[in-house]
Amino acid sequence: MKKAGVVVFPGSNCDQDLVEALSRSGFEKVAKLWHKQSDLEDCDIVFLPGGFSYGDYLRSGAIARFSPIMKEVKAFGERGNFVVGICNGFQILTEANMLPGALLRNKDRLFICDYTNLVVQNPKTPITNSLKSDQVYSIPIAHGEGRFFAKEKEMDEIIEGNQILFKYATADGLTTSDANPNGSLENIAGICNRGGNILGMMPHPERVSDPRLGRADGKALLSSIRTFLD
Amino acid sequence: MIFKANVTVMPQPEILDPQGKAVEQALHQIGIGSAQNVRIGKRIEFLIEADSEKLAFDKVTEASKGLLANVIMENFKVELELN
């Protein structure tokens, strides 16, 4: 039995979607964790959902990282446990220095809400281990600040450490600049830390996890995490 | 002593600033075609109590590094005046 925790910050708006999607992806228990609590309630994995925590004031994720629960989440991650940030959750993880780099305003200034095609880069992480490396996964993004950026040295370390989870690609799986929606370096859609236990991605797998809503590619990603925990 | 702190946070020079680009285009549209290199940052003001200007400066610098600026993508400048 595995229990997932979904942290709820003021301004999170994908938390309930994520709870539903995780339940549908094999997690036997899913709990919402209010940002003011400091107890992770024995969760086996913690998710930081999308939304606009604290109104995205100052910078996306900049204030949420100081929420009481984040101290616990950081310690939880440092002990080697799994932490996954989606969209705003990814932004919070970079602001908290749990993941390298930063997420800047999209290159074309637009808030983009659209499907993107993702291809797996490192197939050995929790979120990619059950995925096929020759398959394209259609997962939507919804963000204004998703342009992944890291300084050259940091970027070299990310590549050397095989820390790229997904890249934006064409429908044929080519990681061309045309397929890059927001100007992210290297078409990066998601990364992990060196240890492979802290993961962040801008696209929203929880939004495509029920075939009744059209597509279910996201369920493959979330189920992959669940399988990895066994 | 109470100081007024002004922290200016700017995107680092090598970072593309789409907001600045949009404003630059608008400046050209209103006839100021010579405007270039528009960069948009933010200014944060607050009062802070400290025993000396040096200590106030150190505190504000700590605040800037820890919260007000993200040093991966932004530079900041601290200015103090006696309130």
Image (tube, grey):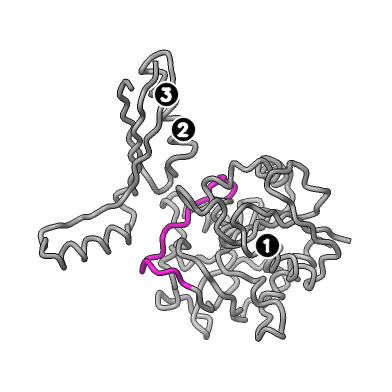
Give neighbour class at mark 3: few <14, some 14-19, many 20+ (Cα, 10 Å): some
Cα–Cα span, label 3 and label 2? 9 Å
Quadrant position of the N terminus of chain A in the picture: bottom right
Q: x%, y% of residue B55?
A: 42, 18
Residue contact at pointers 1 and 3, CB within 8 angstroms: no
In terms of image quadrants, where is residue A217?
A: bottom right
Q: Main secondary structure of the magenta part?
A: loop
Q: Amino acid at mark 1?
A: Asp
Please state which of the two labelled residues, at mark 1 or mark 2, is closer to the viewer.
Answer: 1
In the rendered structure, the residue with mark 3 lies on which chain? B
Q: What is the secondary structure assignment of the residue under circle 1? A: helix
Horizontally, residue A187 falls left or right of residue B27, namely right
Q: Amino acid at mark 2?
A: Ala
Q: What is the secondary structure assignment of the residue under circle 3? A: helix
The residue at 45%/77% (across/down) is A179
The residue at 46%/30% (across/down) is B62
Q: Nearer the viewer, residue A76 or A134?
A: A76
In the rendered structure, the residue with mark 2 lies on which chain? B
- The mark found on residue B63 in the picture is 2
Q: Report the residue marked by disc 1.
A: A15
Q: Compared with residue A159, is residue A121 higher up or lower down, i.e. above or below? A: below
In the rendered structure, the residue with mark 1 lies on which chain? A
Give neighbour class at mark 2: few <14, some 14-19, many 20+ (Cα, 10 Å): few
- The mark found on residue B58 in the picture is 3
Q: What is the secondary structure assignment of the residue under circle 2? A: helix
Please state which of the two labelled residues, at mark 1 or mark 3, is closer to the viewer.
Answer: 1
Q: x%, y% of residue A193?
A: 61, 52
Q: What segment is highlighted magenta in the picture?
A: A95-112
Q: Nearer the viewer, residue B38 or A217?
A: B38
Cα–Cα span, label 1 and label 3? 39 Å
Horizontally, residue A194 falls left or right of residue A112, namely right
